[in-house]
Image (cartoon, coloured by chain):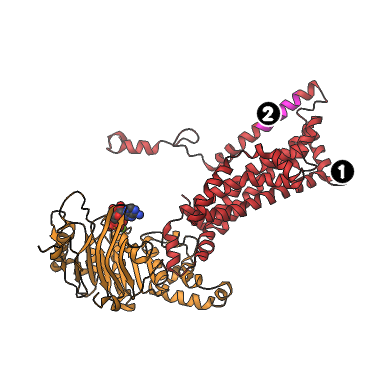
Chain colours: A red, B orange
């Protein structure tokens, strides 16, 4: 009967269920979506536990894939017991040292990047003066000048902060510059016709439109910032998450390294989400206008 | 000189705009009295927006004089308001903030806070005029196209510019909304009496809105000959005052209305219809031409 209707083809198509996982048209239902997210994590953990167990059966003192309880012990020692030599709780002093370096380095590069990006985007004179120079600087691989930084700024905090700054500042500047350039010329002319001074155009019309973009580019630059932080701590430091990982590597202390890496991931995720939240709640217009 | 340069709100004489050998505006003469709605039409790419940018101060004439209230106007400032087809509004500000933006940008940090209540009251007054009072806390992306343009108009008007420039402000709207906006603009004009310079490529819109219509066109001839070196730009080929008949959209259905449109289309939009410079249909009482030698050579 159904086949007799002229639109039965369409009905058939509608009746056909959409695939839930595979293909262009897949529409995973809500429960499945969560399940899908968890699967890779569960697999990784299961694989680890299995491999660790296997190795420990053959050699109870295996160091390469420590058991969960061994890692928990290491975490307890690092996080809650005072180090006998320094009198500090290692995990927290390491975290504080690293965060300070990233905060100062990335903070400075965000501020400089914002101002420079604004000027490059809005002032043709400054653009002429500095854009080629910034492009030149941005192509220097930051790690290649790390020795120079250590020589010039010493092996203390300054060199590490400067490395993070150097590694992120050209990218932030270029990002801000490009999004300032993308603001339609009409907006600037409009502001002038409303009686804005040049100063007001830069700081009261364009800057507020750029702030969420700055937060976005800082988010993206967290990755490189960690890279430069850990690289510089690995080479010369007396504290820091990267320093610790490279220090205990000598004793094959995987029971410390693995929790430290997970800790770094957790910090990174938290910062990323906080920044995302700020954009979502403070700059809803930004998300709506982003294509 | 003819006295008009002192009495006109906007005065252009012998204005040329040449982009690297490509003449766009070719000897424009124009005097505009205050309180008019000037509509400027012409074929696509003839230079309407270019002329508007010159009045705005975003660009300057290659040669010639352009005066506003008898003075060289310089870079864009609050003497001229502008409403674009898009991007007129600041995306990061609410409707209310978009309208108070003008007065606020002219105040320092502390004055802004002191006068806050006053500014909001003034903005509300303009938002009521454009019938958007109930949407003041929305962001531009939450408004329809027509609403956005009304905010843009309020945003400009609050600065009380000597002249409000509009470059195809309704060009992106659907026909129904567009007609509503035309009516709306006319009502607002009758109420406030501001001077408007309205660029459009829609002839019907130009005739409906304008109290004076200008046609800019490159389809004409003159005595410069047709050798290779001669590159003509657009001139004002038609300039009439329009009776502002009862401003209801029903006038668009009248035979006179369509007859006038047919006539203007022929004068400005048909490439085959080439009038000589000396015969341009410039009937408006402020219309004037300073004919230059090579263009019109009676010998
Ligand atoms: N900055 C510029 N440099 C070079 N040529 C330009 C520039 N601005 C405009 N032109 C040229 O001037 C001519 C007129 O441009 P304009 O935008 O004023 O036309 P229009 O009448 O507004 O057209 P439309 O109806 O499409 O908006 C075009 O041929 C354009 O290519
Ligand atoms: Mg145009």
Name which residue lies at 38% across and 39% down.
A14
Discs 1 and 2 lie in a common subunit: yes
User: In the picture provided, is B5 more to the left or to the right than B110?
Assistant: left
Highlighted range, magenta? A44-54
The answer to whether residue A7 is above or below residue A250 is below
Residue A230, horizontal then vertical, whole percent: 71, 40
Query: Is residue A46 within the magenta segment?
Result: yes
Q: Is residue A17 above or below residue B175?
A: above
Image mark for residue A83: 1
- Nearest the viewer among A250 and A55 is A250
Direction right: furthest residue: A84
Name the residue beneath numbered marker 2.
A47
Task: Tell which circle, 1 or 2, labels the residue nearer the N-terminal end.
Answer: 2
* Residue at (89, 42) in percent of width and height: A85
**Where residue A112 sits: x, y (%)?**
61, 53
Q: What's the magenta bit mostly, secondary-structure-wise?
A: helix
Instruction: Please give left or right for residue A10 compared with residue A193 in the image.
Output: left
Please give the label number shown on residue B75.
none
Q: SS of the residue at dot 1?
A: loop
Mark 1: few/some/many CA within 10 Å (<14, 14-19, 20+):
some
The quarter of the rendering in which ligand 2 is drawn is: bottom left
The chain to which mark 1 is attached is: A
Asked which secondary structure carries label 2, the reply is helix
Q: Can you tell which quarter of the image residue A242 is in?
A: top right
Q: Quadrant of the C terminus of chain B?
A: bottom left
Front-most of residues B242 and B225: B225
Residue A74 location, x and y as percent? 81, 37
Name the subunit of mark 2. A
- Left/right placement of residue B239 relative to residue B90 reads left
Q: Residue at position x 52%, y 54% from top? A: A126
Residue A222, horizontal then vertical, whole percent: 63, 45
């Amino acid at each position: 009967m159904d086949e007799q209707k002229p639109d039965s083809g369409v009905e058939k198509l509608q009746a056909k269920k959409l695939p839930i996982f595979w293909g262009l048209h897949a529409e995973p239902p809500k429960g499945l979506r969560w399940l899908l997210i968890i699967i890779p994590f569960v697999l990784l953990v299961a694989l680890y536990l299995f491999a660790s167990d296997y190795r420990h059966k053959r050699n109870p003192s295996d160091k390469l894939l420590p058991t969960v309880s061994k890692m928990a012990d290491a975490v307890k020692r690092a996080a809650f017991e005072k180090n006998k030599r320094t009198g500090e709780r290692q995990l927290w002093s390491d975290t504080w040292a690293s965060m300070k370096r990233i905060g100062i380095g990335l903070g400075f590069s965000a501020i400089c990047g914002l101002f420079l990006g604004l000027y490059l985007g809005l002032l043709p004179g400054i653009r002429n003066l500095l854009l080629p120079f910034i492009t030149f600087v941005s192509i220097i691989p930051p790690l290649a000048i790390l020795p120079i930084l250590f020589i010039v700024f010493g092996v203390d905090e300054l060199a590490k902060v400067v490395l993070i700054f150097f590694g992120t500042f050209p990218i932030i500047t270029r990002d801000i510059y490009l999004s300032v350039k993308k603001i339609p010329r009409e907006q600037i002319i409009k502001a002038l016709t409303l009686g804005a001074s040049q100063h007001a155009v830069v700081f009261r019309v364009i800057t507020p439109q750029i702030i969420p973009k700055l937060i976005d580019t800082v988010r993206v630059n967290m990755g490189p910032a960690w890279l430069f932080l850990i690289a510089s701590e690995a080479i010369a430091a007396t504290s820091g998450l990267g320093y610790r990982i490279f220090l205990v590597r000598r004793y094959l202390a995987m029971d410390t390294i693995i929790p430290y890496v997970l800790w770094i991931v957790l910090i990174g995720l938290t910062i990323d989400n906080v920044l995302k939240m700020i954009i979502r709640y403070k700059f809803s217009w930004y998300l709506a206008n982003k294509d | 000189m003819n006295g008009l340069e002192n009495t006109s709100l906007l005065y252009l004489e012998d204005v040329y705009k040449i982009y690297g050998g490509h003449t766009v505006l070719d000897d424009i003469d124009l005097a505009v009295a205050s309180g008019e709605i000037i509509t400027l039409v012409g074929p696509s790419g003839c230079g309407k927006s270019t002329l508007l940018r010159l009045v705005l101060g975003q660009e300057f004439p290659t040669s010639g004089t352009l005066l506003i209230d008898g003075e060289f106007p310089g870079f864009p400032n609050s003497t001229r308001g502008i409403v674009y087809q898009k991007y007129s509004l600041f995306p990061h500000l609410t409707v209310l903030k978009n309208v108070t933006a003008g007065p606020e940008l002219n105040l320092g940090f502390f004055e802004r806070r002191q006068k806050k209540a006053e500014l909001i009251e003034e903005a509300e007054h303009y938002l009521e005029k454009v019938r958007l009072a109930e949407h003041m806390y929305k962001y531009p992306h939450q408004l329809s196209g027509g609403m956005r343009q009304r905010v843009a108009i309020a945003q400009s008007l609050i600065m009380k510019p000597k002249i409000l420039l509009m470059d195809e402000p309704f060009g992106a709207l659907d026909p129904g909304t567009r007609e509503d906006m035309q009516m709306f603009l006319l009502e607002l004009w009758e109420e406030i009496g501001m001077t408007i310079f309205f660029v459009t490529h829609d002839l019907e819109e130009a005739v409906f809105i304008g109290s004076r219509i200008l046609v800019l066109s490159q389809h004409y001839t003159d005595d410069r000959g047709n050798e290779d070196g001669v590159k003509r730009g657009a001139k004002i080929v038609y300039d009439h005052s329009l009776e502002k008949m009862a401003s209801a959209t029903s006038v668009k259905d009248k035979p006179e209305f369509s007859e006038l449109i047919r006539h203007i289309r022929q004068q400005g939009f048909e490439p085959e219809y080439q009038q000589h410079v000396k015969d341009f249909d410039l009937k408006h009482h402020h219309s004037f031409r300073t004919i230059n030698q090579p263009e019109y050579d009676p010998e």
